[in-house]
Image (cartoon, rainbow, N blue to C red):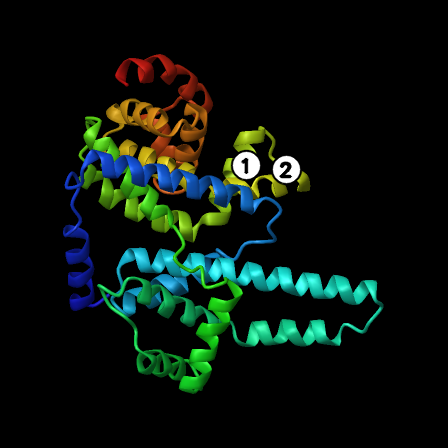
């Protein structure tokens, strides 16, 4: 990353302030996020597949960085792309099912799949551009910038094709692209923690949370696979268990508390139990769940060996031991 880009990103992070919003506003916003999260978790049940793959997420992050976009834009772009690709996969599966039922040739299915793969980069870039338009107060990526970037990769498109691509994404998602991201939940909970007298400063936790959130996006599959194995206490989950776990992957409130708990451990592990206790009190999420997710995140960030030297107790046992401490702190 060159100097100007690094400077601009650092400036956007340093401008973030906590404690500037009235408590009534924070309570209303937290309730709204909780309702959104509950709806998203319910909708996720039975959803097909996931496109938060490492290479895809890394591409979006690097592109956002190249275009000097703030972190929230990169997360939103990933979520828009995820929803769009899931919709496309579901539509393709629906069409294939109909063709099989009516005993029609699957030529249309193959053609549709090829078109989806051939236009994937265009759709990805359109998702980043749409996400940038949602944060218009910061920076909007122009069509010229997008077309020049695509051309540098060997993809030649017209402005009309670019607009059609954006419209295709918008229509597929019923124009509902202002999707919540885990960052919104993290920052809201940090705000509440600040008012609740958290021992670790919110601004200090914020920077670490951003780093860990990047990591979770980049290592989404291995982190959640380890969480699934820990939750069922089985190294080989069944297909049904995996399908039921999809809703957990879409639980951004759970992810946010896991991110904050892991960040608190890195910043000051002696205050970890107090932070986890506050998070449990604010969200109602079980201590075991917070401990297990934060443990999975820490294992993939600082490593199991480093984690073991500082906290040798397994997460599920530590969570049970935290009950008395958390209740006294909150």
Residue at 46 percent of width and 48 percent of height: 220
For label 1, the crowd category at 10 Å Cα-Cα, with few meaning under 14, some 14 to 19 and many 20 or more, is many
Looking at this view, is 293 or 162 the one in front? Answer: 162
Q: Alpha carbon of mark 2 to alpha carbon of mark 1: how far? A: 8 Å
Verify CB contact (< 8 Å) between mark 2 and mark 1: yes
Q: Which mark is residue 228?
A: 1
Q: Is residue 263 above or below residue 312?
A: below
Residue at 22 percent of width and 63 percent of height: 137
Q: Is residue 253 left or right of residue 250?
A: left
- Residue 71: where, in percent of width, then height? 29, 56
Sequence-earlier tag: 2 or 1: 1
Q: Quadrant of the N terminus?
A: bottom left
Report which quarter residue 99 is drawn in: bottom right
Q: Is residue 106 left or right of residue 7?
A: right
Q: Quadrant of the C terminus?
A: top left
Report which quarter residue 27 is drawn in: top left
For label 2, the crowd category at 10 Å Cα-Cα, with few meaning under 14, some 14 to 19 and many 20 or more, is few
SS for dot 2 = helix
Query: What residue does disc 2 label?
Result: 241
Q: Is residue 172 above or below residue 326?
A: below
Q: Is residue 103 above or below residue 252?
A: below
- Let me know if residue 107 appears in the view: yes
Q: Which mark is residue 163?
A: none
SS for dot 1 = helix
- Residue 199: where, in percent of width, then height? 19, 27
Name the outermost residue toward the right: 103
Q: Is residue 24 left or right of residue 302?
A: left
Residue at 43 percent of width and 80 percent of height: 162
Q: Is residue 78 left or right of residue 326?
A: right
């Amino acid at each position: 990353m060159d100097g100007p880009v690094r400077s601009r990103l650092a400036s956007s992070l340093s401008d973030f302030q906590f404690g500037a919003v009235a408590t009534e506003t924070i309570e209303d916003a937290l309730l709204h996020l909780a309702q959104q999260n509950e709806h998203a978790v319910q909708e996720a049940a039975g959803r097909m597949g996931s496109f938060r793959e490492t290479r895809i997420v890394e591409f979006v992050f690097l592109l956002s960085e190249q275009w000097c976009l703030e972190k929230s834009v990169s997360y939103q772009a990933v979520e828009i792309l995820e929803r769009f690709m899931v919709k496309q996969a579901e539509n393709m599966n629906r069409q294939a099912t109909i063709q099989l039922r009516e005993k029609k040739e699957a030529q249309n299915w193959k053609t549709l799949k090829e078109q989806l793969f051939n236009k994937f980069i265009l759709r990805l870039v359109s998702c980043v551009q749409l996400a940038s338009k949602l944060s218009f107060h910061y920076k909007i990526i122009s069509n010229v910038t997008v077309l020049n970037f695509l051309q540098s990769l060997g993809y030649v498109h017209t402005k009309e094709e670019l607009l059609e691509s954006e419209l295709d994404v918008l229509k597929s998602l019923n124009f509902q692209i202002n999707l919540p991201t885990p960052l919104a939940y993290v920052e809201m909970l940090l705000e509440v923690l600040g008012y609740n007298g958290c021992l670790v400063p919110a601004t200090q936790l914020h920077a670490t949370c951003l780093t860990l959130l990047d990591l979770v996006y980049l290592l989404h599959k291995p982190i959640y696979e380890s969480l699934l194995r820990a939750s069922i206490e089985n190294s080989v989950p069944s297909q049904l268990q995996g399908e039921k776990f999809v809703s957990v992957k879409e639980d951004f409130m759970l992810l946010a508390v896991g991110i904050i708990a892991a960040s608190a451990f890195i910043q000051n592990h002696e205050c970890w139990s107090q932070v986890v206790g506050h998070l449990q009190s604010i969200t109602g999420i079980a201590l075991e769940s917070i401990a297990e997710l934060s443990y999975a995140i820490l294992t993939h960030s600082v490593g199991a060996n480093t984690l073991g030297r500082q906290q040798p107790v397994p997460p599920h046992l530590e969570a049970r031991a935290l009950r008395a401490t958390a209740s006294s702190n909150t």
